[in-house]
Structures are given as structure tokens and as C-alpha cells.
Amino acid sequence: MKNDPLLQPLTLKNLTLKNRVMLTSHEPAYPEDGMPKALYRAYHVERAKAGVALTMTAGSAAVSRDSPPVFNNILAYQDEVVPWMRELTDACHEHGTAVMIQLTHLGRRTRWDKGDWLPVVSASNRREASHRAYPKKAEIWDIERLIRDYADAAERMRAAGLDGLEIQAYGHLMDQFWSPLTNELEGPYGGSLDNRLRFTFEVLDAIRRRVGEDFLLGVRYTGDECLPGGFDARDGMEISKRLKRSGLVDFLNVVKGHIDTDPGLTDVIPIQGMPSAPHLDFAGDIKREVDFPTFHGAKIQDVATARHAIASGKVDMIGMTRAHMADPHLMRKVIEGREEEIRPCVGANYCLDRIYQGGAAYCIHNPATGRETTMPHTIAPAETRRKVVVVGTGPGGMEAARVAAERGHEVVVFEAADAPGGQVRLTAQSERRREMMGIIDWRYERCQALGVTFHFNVFAEQEEVVAESPDVVIVATGGLPNEEALAQGNELAVTGWDILSGHAKPGRNVLVYDDAGDHTALQAAEVIARSGARVEYMTADRALAPEVMAMNLVPYMRTLQVLDTTFTPTFRLVALRREGDELVASVESDYTRVGKERRVDQVVVNFGTLPMDDLYESLKPLSNNQGMVDYDKLIVGDPQPIVASDDTGAGFQLFRIGDAISHRNTHAAIYDALRLVKDL
């Protein structure tokens, strides 16, 4: 392992990074009142303990009051941030991990009705599509105060003991000055490339004068906007060279693309089904031409790709941020030669999509990420070995089996199918979502290594479960599609599951009705549209598939729009009837109750699932807790109370998780399992 390219040190000025892997700047939206308090600190320290060389906090910390975060970011313009950042930095330094922060002014990439309700400022009046704010055009006094704000924020970070910082340029205010598309200023800050870069170099100079020469300073920027009329790769190369020649910066952090729209953002930060490391060669071109320390990160989700990035000399530091959200101990496993145990990032992008909807970043299949103060990343062994029976091998069932086995319990799993997976196996039928099977495969491999016994092709009933003489039974049987939601004609519809599984072939003129708003209807619509059928996608919601969220919606829309799908929001399917060879769908609007009809040859519905709870109900009277969960204990992380057996012989605790309770999502099922089983 001594020759592993990833484990080689890198020296920048007076700082030596112990290896070549970093967390790129990112904001998981964990601050409290704009401050990086206990949870924020615990999140970064967990990864520092495992050996990552550099953790880059914030994405991005706001330097000015007129750069209000649109989600929960660090407020670098407040003096109060210094002691909180010092606590975080000191804690990471104890483990030999360097700490930096990303500072920014969002410019137009925010909203006017956040924070102090100050006008949004940019280099033009052009609105950004994603955040919808029309900015004021920056005046000279704005520019002067913004330069001071950047320098003040940098000085706070120096005072907090950080090792350095980077300025965020792409999509934010710096880039809005750089791009001809967003800079309509006249005079010294607009027009020529020299003028458009002036603000950046004045900021960098002001920062350098405040923090001194030893404090590391870099810029994260796009080297090609990939937009007609914007600056291109040739301009990006020139900007890169000027940054080096300035003598003000110590590293470049290169990306490619633009983030002012959801599709643009998704191309910069690719999700599952999109190519791995799509911008690595581009970053390598800049490093080769400019010959300067270069950082990069964009869908570097596995160790092999990261190792190639360093071994090939394309970059000096490689970012594996989402990979570390999936497995914070990734680097320890690399160092110890246990790469096969790394929990894979499956690119589901639940993390980023949540923060852009105002939530905290959670990994779709590591529920301890973002809950480090309450949930464990390492499972402690139990004091008493018990026998645990799990029924179902969807994500919740597999997590329950894994955690119980990590606790040292004897674990037996029943599954009606011939392989594990549940609904994940169904969703992975789509080529673009096949990475989802990593959620199941990783757990299955861990369970096998831990000695879990699996019984496949067994539709477990009460007798099979009781015969195991369990101490604990966990029902993770999932759900089945709700097929009885219409006022009439339910038997005439097929479900999205029928299409995805191949049990129903696509029609030629199809109405897809989505009531649940998750991936199922969109995946089905994609399969149908690809078959050459005419598709209308309808939902009673005002937005398409709200549970899918913004970045995950992008690939669906790219496919369905090319295939000329019709989208109809705000209409509800209420009934079906057959007339000859046609199905007549009655639809109406919740807004006006206006009734309309659609004549098609197939209707595909997604009304979510209903729990498969027959087994649970049959076991409930035999259990000693009657299936009851003490929510207060569950929430604070205490074990569930064990009720003594009575004269009837009842002797097992009974719980159910995931969709066996109600229709939710993969993360919810896995979180159910972890917080319940970690204390068994």
C-alpha cells in the first residue's frame, strides 16, 4: 500500500497533506443559526478520523449580508463563526486532517426574500433561472464593500486556525463578473476579459494582504461555461494561467459547465446513469498546460477512478465527497486494504436534491450521515446474543439483517423471491438506475461475511417464523401497488410495476397517471415512450414528481421531451371505462372540478403502495410487545423495552419497518432498520 498513488503526501507551501483524497467544498445544510455547531463538527470529524487528507467545509459560506443562503449555509460574515470554526478545525487537526473553507458571494444565485431582504446584486440585471431573483447591477460602492467583506471573512477563517480557503467562482458572483452572459457593466469591471477579471483579482489581493503568505488560497471555478455566448475552454485556459501568474493563489480547483439551471447543475455534478468522472480529462488538460497544483471532483465515486486520477497525473488532489457521505470510513478501508468493504455511492443524489428543497443532506443508504450525533457509523457488539428473524430483503430488511449481524446476533432471513432486492431490484431494471443495486449488493456481501442465513423462495408465514424460536422478528415485507384508488374501472388499469417488470407490454397511446410523485411513474413513462408509443404523463400535483426532486428529474425530462411526451399537471384521474377498443379516462382538476376525458388504449397508474402486513398481523398476538414501538426511546436512541414472556409462550419482540408500515422511500426504510436494530 506504500506505493498507492492515493496515499502519497502533497506539500503546498508549509502544509503537507497526508494523502491525495479530499472532501470538496460542500454544504450539507447542517449549521444551526448559520454556525457550524455540534452536528456539523461531528460530520467532518468522522471523516477526519478515517484518514481523509483535507476536508473543505461549506459550499459556500456567505461573506455578505446581501448573499443570503437559499438553504442552510455557514454565515462567514458574522464574528460568531470564529470559535465554532476553531472547534471544528482543532478536532480535525487532532486526526491529521487539514481544514479549509469555501467563501462566496452568491450574487444573483439567491433570493431577495431571504435573510435581511436586501436587493440581490450581480454584474447585470439578468435573472438566474434556478433562484428566480432579478438582481440590481453592482455599483462601485457595492464592489468596494464586497471586496472588504471577502477580506473580513478570510481574516475570520485565519483567526479560526484553518489551513486555507478557496473562493467559489462558478455560478456565483465571481463567475457572474467573468461571463459575458452575465456582465453588462461598463468601465473598469465590464467589457474586456481584463476588466471582467478585475473584481476577482482585487478580492484575492485584499484577502492575501489580510491572511499573509502562509495561509493557502485557491479558486474553484469553471474552465468552460458550455453555454453559447459564455466563456469557453480557451478563455478558461487563459483565466487559469492568469490565476497562476498573479502569485496570489496556491491551487486551482477546476470544474466544467454552468449551474444556473437544473440541467446545467446536473451536468456539473452528475448523478447515477451518467458517466463517471466526466470532467477529469478537462481538469487534466488545465493542469498539464498551466503546470500548477490542481484539485478536482465530479462523480469520482469509486477508489479505482480516484486512483487513476492521481496515478495518471491529471490532478494533484481528488475530491470524493458523495463517496464519503456514503462511507465516511472510505480512506481507512483503503489504508487497511479493505476496499471491498466500502459502502458504495450509488449516485442517487438524494443528498443534493434534499438541500435544494430546503432539507439537510442525507445519503440514500447511509442514514448515519448527517446524524452523527445520534446514529452510529460503526455498530457496537451486543452484550447478549439473540436470535433475529428478518422477513424480506428489500433495503430495510437487508439493513436490519446487516446491523443485527454486526451486533453479533444469530440472523435468519426469509425471502419469497429467488434473490435479494425487493423494490430496488425492480427499479434497477432501468439501465439508468442500475447502480441502485449497490444498496442491496453491499449489504448482501456484508451479511454473507457475517454469517447470516438466507432462505430464498420461501413465502414465510407464521409457522416458519415461529419455528425458528426467535427473540426478535422484523417484518420488512414491503408493499404492493395500490390498485383500488379509482372510483370505477380499477381493473382496466395496469401499474407502473407491471410495466417495469415486463408483466404488461406498453400500449400505443398511453396515459400515465402519477399520484405518488416518485420514480415509478417516470420510469414507466420512459419505458413506454422508448417503445414508440404516444405518452401523456398526468399528475394532480402542480409540479412533476416532487418526490424525485430537481436533479433526478433532469435525465427523465431529457428522454421524455425528446420522445415528445405530453405533460399535464393539476389534473386527477378519477375513473376508467371501456368503450370498444378504447379506454375512456375521466379526469378532473382539484382547482375547478372541470371534468375532461382522455381516449387511450392503455392507462398506467402509480398510486403508491399498500403495506403487505398479513404476516405482521398474524404474528402480533404471539409477540410480547404486540408490535408496539416506543417512539420516545426510538427517537433518542434507547433500546426498545423487552417484555417478559407470559404463560402463552410468547417470547419474541415484533417490529415492522419500511413500506411494510407505509409507502415511503429507500432512505426511510434503511433508517427505520438502523435506529431500531442498532440497540437490539
Image: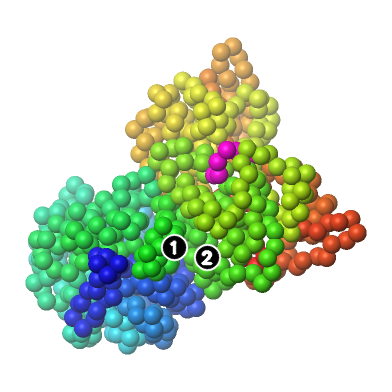
Taking depth in this image into account, of 417 and 663 the one nearest to the observer is 417
Of residue 69 and residue 563, the one placed in the foreground of this image is 563
Please say if 397 is above or below 142.
Answer: above
> What secondary structure is marked by label 2?
loop
Kind of residue at badge 1? Asp
SS majority, magenta? loop
Q: Amino acid at mark 2?
A: Ala
Q: At x 43% / y 33%, what residue is drawn? A: 526
**Separation of residues labelled 2 and 1 (CA atoms):** 10 Å
For the N terminus, the image quarter is bottom left
- Stretch of the chain drawn in magenta: 416-421
Q: Residue at x 49, y 24 (%)?
A: 506
Q: Which residue is mark 1?
A: 327
Q: Residue at x 11, y 76 (%)?
A: 247
- x, y (%) of residue 371? 53, 68
Q: Return the x and y of residue 631 as percentages of the image width and height.
A: 70, 65
* Location of residue 375 (image quadrant): bottom right
Q: Is residue 448 magenta?
A: no
